[in-house]
Amino acid sequence: MPYAVQAVRAGGPEVFESVEVPRPVPGPGQLLVKVAAAGVNFIETYQRAGVYPVDYPFIPGSEAAGTVVEVGPGVEGFAPGDRVAGSDGNGTYADYTLMPAGKTFHVPDAVSDDAAAALPLQGMTAHYLINSSFKVSPGDKVLTYAGAGGVGLLLTQLLKLRGATVITTTSTPEKAALARAAGADHVLGYEEVPDAVRSVTGGRGVDVVYDGIGKDTFESSLAALRTRGTVVLFGGASGQVPPFDLQRLNGLGSLTVTRPKLADFTRDADEVRWRSGEIMSLAADGRLDVRIGGLYPLADVGRAHSDLESRATTGKTLLVPAGSPLAGGLS
């Protein structure tokens, strides 16, 4: 019998247990995928902890890469044996998962299983941020946070390919070195924003802030902007921004704030193919380096969650089932 890990109740990482589960059967429009690696994301820590309501017992996970085992009725363009990835799976902390064909994409031969599993959510997030939420142009000055995180490292590389000046933040010298290696022009401590941002931009401020931290950084994000600048608030790692008086945007220089989410920028198969195709092509030809911060055995999911929540990780955190080709490289 295949295995999965489930949260048996709301709580800390100790609530996970490994269980035998039936192998899923794909329905119309679905793919049955044997999981090579599953992405670990903050939303799953919120679901496990009970911050986001779910029904327990609950098998977390939506992001994975693997191999198609079976296709459901009406599926075209996929066949058993295809390497695929996506961020809309169902219970990917498992040996097998069901994925919607319309939100799943093929993985090029030159992209490894672990890189493929790291890119669907964070890679397409970085893509929509700089192409759709605020379209970055060459010469733009950009502030991001958590420059050594999964999104941060990808975002910096994509911004440099676009010709932008990148200012980012990190919390340790080791993380600062990773951010600089990804191409960041200026790496600051969190306490230096916005004063240092004003200094390195000659007092002007940045064109856009990509803020995935939320409550703790939002005021600094506003203060770092140029007149008519934009904050793209795409996450809340420190908590959600409290209710906000929109009239303040007027007094601060006719600013714009937007609060997007990935689902609204991957609404159909064409959009998924566009975003995933560009990201996978960059990874395949070596222009986008994908940092895997941690590969954890699926059964060690509690430690993966603990490390993610304590900000001990860099890059992408992945879970590897025992039957995955990647399992042999785990210690």
Image: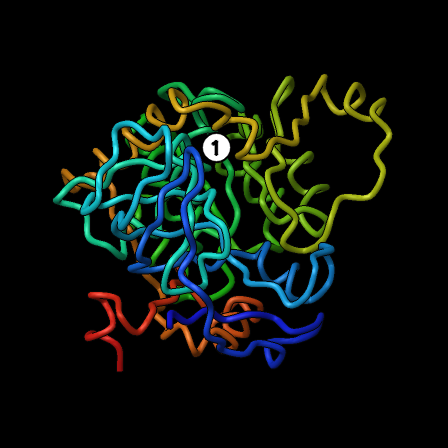
Q: Is residue 133 above or below residue 151?
A: above
Q: Residues within 10 Å of mark 1 (few under 14, many from 20)?
A: many
Q: Quadrant of the C terminus?
A: bottom left
Q: Is residue 313 above or below residue 133?
A: below
Q: Is residue 128 left or right of residue 105?
A: right
Residue depicted at 37% across the width and 33% down the height:
73
Which type of secondary structure does the marked residue at label 1 adopt?
strand
- Comparing 54 with 120, the one in front is 54
Instruction: Residue 13 in the image: state x and y as whole percent.
Output: 59, 76
Instruction: Say which quadrant the N terminus sits in.
Output: bottom left
Percent coordinates x, y for residue 318 in the rendering: 38, 63
Which of the 4 image quadrants contains residue 226? top right
Residue located 48% across and 32% down the image: 142
Look at the picture and state if 18 lies above or below 286.
below
Looking at numbered disc 1 in the image, what kind of residue is underneath it? Val
Instruction: Name which residue lies at 36% across and 42% down.
Output: 31
Q: Nearest the camera: 280 or 67?
A: 67
- Badge 1 is on which residue? 142
* Snapshot quadrant of residue 45: bottom right
Give the side of residue 308 with respect to residue 126, left or right.
right
